[in-house]
Image (spheres, helix red, strand yellow):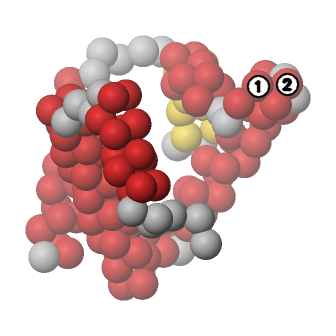
Amino acid sequence: MKKVFICFAVSCLFLVGGCAKKEKPAITIGPITLTAEEFESAYQKAKGPAARMAGRKEFLDVLITRKLVLQEAEILGLDKDPQFLESLQLFWEQSLLKLVLARKLNELSLICKVSDKEISDYYQRYELLGISNNK
């Protein structure tokens, strides 16, 4: 199962990489290239304005360091480590479950409508019975 998932993920990466238009790299450090579009996308996705307040240069330094550390991890073969692959599989499954549950919840929220009157009637009915949710 893991090997099938990994082959599928690698195939998708090659397919996406092959279909994308080739943009000239803004930065090249050894085999690592970073286009201006990739940098801008990463910068905008940074967690909140506080992360972006440090400035573009500082963010670029952190991004380059991160890319270099990831490259070193690949050189060491950590991307093929069984423990890593197991955690990747678990992450994939959890992400997929989160996505499908969010979609189902959205579907249900569109179907289920409860009016203010229904809510008020519910609380009045249980107040009369002496049942309280407060403990």
- Residue drawn 54% across and 33% down? 33
Is residue 127 visible to the viewer in this orientation of the structure?
Answer: yes
**Please, what secondary structure does the residue beneath circle 2 have?**
helix
- Which image quarter: residue 71? bottom right
Query: Which numbered disc covers residue 49?
Result: 1
Judge the density around disc 1: few (<14), some (14-19), many (≥20) Cα neighbours within 10 Å: few
- Residue drawn 28% across and 22% down? 20
Near-viewer residue (97 or 112)? 112
Query: Which numbered disc covers residue 67?
Result: none
**Which x, y percent locates residue 53?**
85, 25
Q: Residue furthest bottom?
A: 82
Near-viewer residue (85 or 128)? 128
> How many discs mark residues in the rendered view?
2
Q: Amino acid at mark 1?
A: Pro
Q: Residue furthest front?
A: 128
CA separation in Å, label 2 and label 1: 6 Å
- Residue drawn 65% across and 26% down? 43
Do residues under tags 2 and 1 come within 8 Å of each other at their CB atoms? yes
Compared across the picture, whether 105 is left or right of 43 comes to: left
- Which image quarter: residue 62? top right
Judge the density around disc 2: few (<14), some (14-19), many (≥20) Cα neighbours within 10 Å: few
Q: Amino acid at mark 2?
A: Met
Image quadrant holding the N terminus, namely bottom left
Query: Which numbered disc covers residue 53?
Result: 2
**Which x, y percent locates residue 13?**
26, 43
